[in-house]
Structure formats: C-alpha cells, structure tokens
C-alpha cells in the first residue's frame, strides 16, 4: 500500500468516472482514423434521446455502425478543414461524440495508430423519431436517467462523459459572439464558428475561433472543528427531514478552491475555516459539474454556527462516531425512504462526493 493510500484511503474510484474507455483525445482531429473507427463493425454506438441512453432492463444497449449508417453516413469522410469550408448552417447532422477506445475489448479490435481495442461513440437521436421507433419496437427504451445511482462503475463513466458533451453541444448551437450557427468539431469536443456562415465574427481573429466544453467547479465541504473531533453537516430547506450532508457551493471566478471553501462555509454556516485540504473529486454530469471534495479545519473559536445567508435550514456539529454510524447505517439517496430501523441523521450514499469526503475525514481523524 502506498503512503498516500495509507493516509487518505483508496482513491480514484469516484462514481461517474474512471471507466473502461481511454479517450485518446489527440486522435479527435484525425479524420482518417475516425472514419475507420466510426465505420468498423466492432464499434459501439450509445444513442441518446434528450440525454437519456437507450437501455434494456437497466443496461445500456449499444448499436453497431450498420444500425446508424443511414442516419450518420460517413461523418469523418472529409477532413475537418474541408467540412468547415463547406459548412451549411441549414443542415443539422446529429451530434456525434467519439468517446475513445476500450483497450481491453480486443475481439475484432480496430487499430488506431498503436492503440487497439473497441471504439465507442455517443450519438444524439433526439429528433429522429422513425429511428427511435425502430428501437422501442425492439423492446428497448430511452430511460430517464436523471441522477441515476444504480449503474455499474463502467456504465456510470460512459454516461457521464457522453451526457455532459451531448448537453454542451446542444447548448452551443449558436456562436456566443455573432449569433451564427456553430459547427461541432474535434469529434464532438469543440465547436467553431465557420467562416462559411458569411458572418463577420470576432471569434475568428487570433486563436479564439472556438469554444471548448465547460466544467463548472463546485466545492463539497466538510468543516472540521479546531480539535478535529467533530464535523459540521448542513440541511438544505428543500431536503427531507433529518437528511444532512456536507456544505457546498460554486467556485467563483477569481477564487482559489481553498478560498471558495472558506467563503462558502462562512456564508452558509458562519464557521471560520483556516487550512483546507482537497480530498478527491468527481464529475457530475447534470449537466457538467466537477465536484471537489474538501475538508477545512476551523480556526480556534471559529465553530459558532450563525447563518449569514439563508440557504440552510440547519447546520449541526456531529461527533466522528456519529458520522461513522450515519455513513455505515443511514446512507442513501434523499429521494429514497429512510433506512428501516435507523433513527440517526441520514446522509448521502457512497456514490456521492459528500459521502467520500466524510469518509476521508474519518480516515484521518477517527482512530
Ligand atoms: Zn461567430
């Protein structure tokens, strides 16, 4: 066991990340390879209707190129430059994302440079009603996956990557500078405002003719008392009775993560934090947040709870044994019924950053 694992516990396993696909982002502009990958018989397409993946009995249904060929043709047949020059804003091809290769899936593998495996794509079929009907006729469904915590680790990571990028493409159909129609490039990981729209767009001057996917950083905060014996948990006004979690807040422009942690802890609960330590992070694809789990220790005498803002119904200090019991016995999603027989404070389940950062606090201080 490494020293870091010894100190902080096993890491790098957050739900919604660390899946089987290697992104190989440097291949996204290589249309020759993407053409081969997108038309290869082993390649897998996960189709989405309004960000909901095609599923059967809680498992994703992957389609092959032949299933989607009439819809997408050969999207990478021409180079990116030639597609940009010929861009016609009146045509809207379905958004297609190259997710990468599963290097472990080697039966009938495709070789992209020195990498060999199965290629994965995400495809938006939201406005393809006839296509969707052929799928539902086969007994499949575009299952509503709003905050789905029931997936396997691999599926959660594929969903998170696909969902955030499809959503971002959908929100960036028009250039934020000139209002012209944009074109999705870099295999779905960048949009540009092509000159062929005829608009005189300021984004084409210098290196700014582009927009990249957004990730919104959010701190998930476990304030620790000065004596390291208690953790502060909060309860939002909209949450069920007796449900507590770590504090949270968006990191603002011009702020370090540490500063945002101190500010949010103060604004939500009035406590004064000094030293901040980041525990681990987690992508959260609703739509595209990066949760940053952090713990912060109060200054001496900084534990008094007041409520400078009015977001929280209540913030309460819990002892480490109380938190340990809650994580072990009372952890589930807030939309689930409380666990039978458990009467202590309810807390988020292990798929959530708040649970993990609280586990981190216990690992360090609950000896
Ligand atoms: Zn523009």
Image (spheres, grey):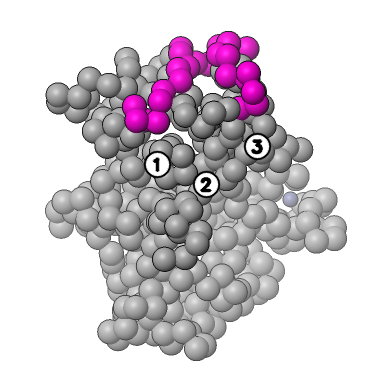
Q: Nearer the viewer, mark 1 or mark 3?
A: 1
Which residue is painted at 56% across and 70% down in the image?
25
Residue drawn at point x = 51 percent, y = 28 percent: 247
| Eye-nearest disc, 1 or 2 | 1
Residue at mark 1: 367
Residue 139 included in the magenta stretch of the image: no
Residue positioned most to the right: 206
Q: CA distance from mark 2 to mark 3?
A: 13 Å
Q: CA distance from mark 1 to mark 3?
A: 21 Å
Is the C-beta of the residue carrying label 3 under 8 Å from the nearest atom of ligand 1?
Answer: no
Q: Going by the image, does 139 lie left or right of 357?
A: left
| Residue holding disc 2 | 279
Q: Which portion, as a residue range, is magenta?
A: 298-323
Q: Secondary structure at mark 1?
A: loop
Are dots 2 and 3 in contact, CB under 8 Å?
no
- Name the residue that disc number 3 marks: 275
Q: Quadrant of the C terminus?
A: top left
For the N terminus, give its image quadrant: bottom left
Specify which label sits upstream in the sequence, 1 or 2.
2
Q: How many marks?
A: 3
Q: Nearer the viewer, residue 87 or 303?
A: 303
For marks 1 and 3, the one nearer the N-term is: 3
Image spot of residue 108 (x, y percent): 30, 86
Q: Is residue 58 left or right of residue 110?
A: left
């Amino acid at each position: 066991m490494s020293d870091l694992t010894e100190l902080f516990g096993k890491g790098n396993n957050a739900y919604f990340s660390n899946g089987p696909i290697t992104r190989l982002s440097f291949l996204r502009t290589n249309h020759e390879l993407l053409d081969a990958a997108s038309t290869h018989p082993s390649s897998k397409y996960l189709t989405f209707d309004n960000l909901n993946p095609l599923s059967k009995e809680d498992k994703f249904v992957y389609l092959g190129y032949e299933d989607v060929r009439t819809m997408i043709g050969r999207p990478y047949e021409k180079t990116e430059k030639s597609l940009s020059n010929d861009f016609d804003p009146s045509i809207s091809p379905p958004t297609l994302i190259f997710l990468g290769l599963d290097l472990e899936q080697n039966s009938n593998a495709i070789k992209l440079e020195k990498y060999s495996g199965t290629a994965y794509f995400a495809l938006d079929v939201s406005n393809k009603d006839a296509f969707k009907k052929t799928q539902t006729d086969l007994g499949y469904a575009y299952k509503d996956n709003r905050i789905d915590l029931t997936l396997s680790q691999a599926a959660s990571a594929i969903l998170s990557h696909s969902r955030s990028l499809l959503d971002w493409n959908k929100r960036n159909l028009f250039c934020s500078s000139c209002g012209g129609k944009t074109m999705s490039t870099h295999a779905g990981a960048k949009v540009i405002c092509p000159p062929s729209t005829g608009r005189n767009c300021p984004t084409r001057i210098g290196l700014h003719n582009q927009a990249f996917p957004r990730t919104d950083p959010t701190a998930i905060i476990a304030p620790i008392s000065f004596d390291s014996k208690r953790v502060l948990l909060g309860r939002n006004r909209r949450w069920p009775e007796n449900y507590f979690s770590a504090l949270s807040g968006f990191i603002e422009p011009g702020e370090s993560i540490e500063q945002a942690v101190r500010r949010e802890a103060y604004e939500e609960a009035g406590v004064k934090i000094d030293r901040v330590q980041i525990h681990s992070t987690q992508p959260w694809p609703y739509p595209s947040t990066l949760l940053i789990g952090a713990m912060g220790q109060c200054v001496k005498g900084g534990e008094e709870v007041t409520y400078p803002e009015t977001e929280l119904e209540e913030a309460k200090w819990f002892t480490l044994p109380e938190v340990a019991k809650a994580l072990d016995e009372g952890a589930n999603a807030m939309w689930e019924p409380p666990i039978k027989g458990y009467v202590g404070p309810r807390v988020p389940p292990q798929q959530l950053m708040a649970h993990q950062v609280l586990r981190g606090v216990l690992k360090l201080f609950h000896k």
